[in-house]
Image (cartoon, coloured by chain):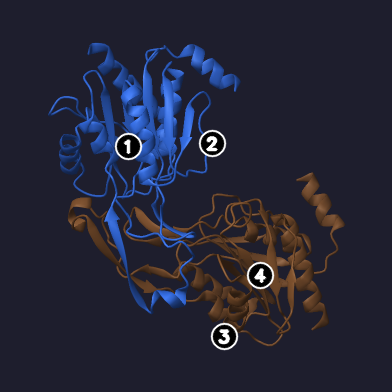
Chain colours: A blue, B brown
Amino acid sequence: AIIEAAQGVLTPQRLAGRRILITAGPTREAVDPVRFISNRSSGRMGFAIAAAAQRMGAQVTLVHGPCGIPPPRGVLPVAVESAEQMLAAVQVAWPQSDAAIMSAAVSDYRPLQVAPQKLKKEAQGGQQIQWSLTENPDILAYAGANKQPGQWLVGFAAETEKLLQHGTEKRRRKGCDLLVVNDVSRQDIGFDATHNEVMVLGPGEDAVESWARCRKDEIAQQLMERLAACMETA
Amino acid sequence: AIIEAAQGVLTPQRLAGRRILITAGPTREAVDPVRFISNRSSGRMGFAIAAAAQRMGAQVTLVHGPCGIPPPRGVLPVAVESAEQMLAAVQVAWPQSDAAIMSAAVSDYRPLQVAPQKLKKEAQGGQQIQWSLTENPDILAYAGANKQPGQWLVGFAAETEKLLQHGTEKRRRKGCDLLVVNDVSRQDIGFDATHNEVMVLGPGEDAVESWARCRKDEIAQQLMERLAACMETA
């Protein structure tokens, strides 16, 4: 706590007065009261971003799925489970924010129906079964489509191949100013790792930066400095 | 650590020399490198059982899915992800064990095919999709079917309705000596909670005990005392 307080004092307050929305972690989509669909996001990258923004003086709202790690001090944590719950929280917070960093790994699909009781193996019907899934709301696209002048939107892309191509397409399609791309096929970085190695695309059409592999808190700090610089020039 | 050591000294070594296999936590069934199917098991009940058995002098092998909590000291932890990996570990450990307590919440089904690359939303084909799933191996039934004379098998049932009926059927079907039934529809006990309230069925055909709500470590201790008593009379 003393170290955190010292870091706060020593960090230039480049984001003082800025209201920043951050989404983090996975979502969980219930199949029944027991089973769910989810993904390997640990929430560490988003929590590190929230801590960095808070240290730089921002008022941070952190909307997060189930992560199992405590939210950083000094941020407003909003705990959700499903993509629909996350969207509802974002719909409240985004219009009041100067910037959003959407690092959550939102499940693309959820079960079409949620069983009210635990599905018995015997009742599911044999060796092979089918689950019907329906598309979840696209929270990043919602934020992009509802971006007001002066608001900054930062998206994340977790890719396993064709990183630059997929990232460039995603940045355009979702209406992000910046897009952070990471390679989740590598074991040493990304999901559930302490380190990351990312490409940052934008805000210009052809702007691409490759950042060297480093700790997630260092990436977070660099990213918030990058965002602060964008916001200062606007 | 001092308290743990003192508890070890103060706990009668009723399980001294016994080799006990414990399974705990959820399994994760990969859909692709990022997505998975899992369930709400926290592993807390199984980890508490492992700690209790170890305190009572047993040699404990703890086969566990992704839990996010550290295994208790003095046990042999075997970390797995999928049901197939858990079965492989159990097939090695069970023949060498005097008793097994199978508290893991094993996924009944896994995706029929695991995609080698992250499935792109666009490539999955629209608003509604189907996932084809195939039945997982039944680890508890494997242990029941391969039980040797003198081995004791304790199963768990997580139910949301008709607890006694479902539990009685499951105990018989899986070949368990004891079956611990808990009601996972209640928020205050079971999955991810610190407390639990269970029914214990067996070893006699009509034997049913209802245990009062208490902390998971107390349930674990009681259950290991119950098992030790069974093993002593055999």
Q: Quadrant of residue A83?
A: top left
What SS does tag 4 mark? strand
* SS assignment at label 3: helix
Tag 1 secondary structure: loop
Closer-to-camera residue (B168/B96): B168
For the N terminus of chain A, the quadrant is top right
> Relative to B189, is B84 above or below?
below
Sequence-first disc among 1 and 2: 2
Judge from the rendering whether residue A125 lies leftward or rightward of residue A72; answer left or right: left
Q: Amino acid at mark 3?
A: Ala
Question: Is label 2 in contact with label 4 (beta carbons under 8 Å)?
Answer: no
Residue marked by disc 4: B180
Do the residues under discs 4 and 3 have CB atoms within 8 angstroms?
no
Question: Which chain letter matches label 2?
Answer: A
Residue named by callout 1: A197
Tell me the distance, in whole angstroms, between the alpha carbons under discs 4 and 3. Answer: 19 Å
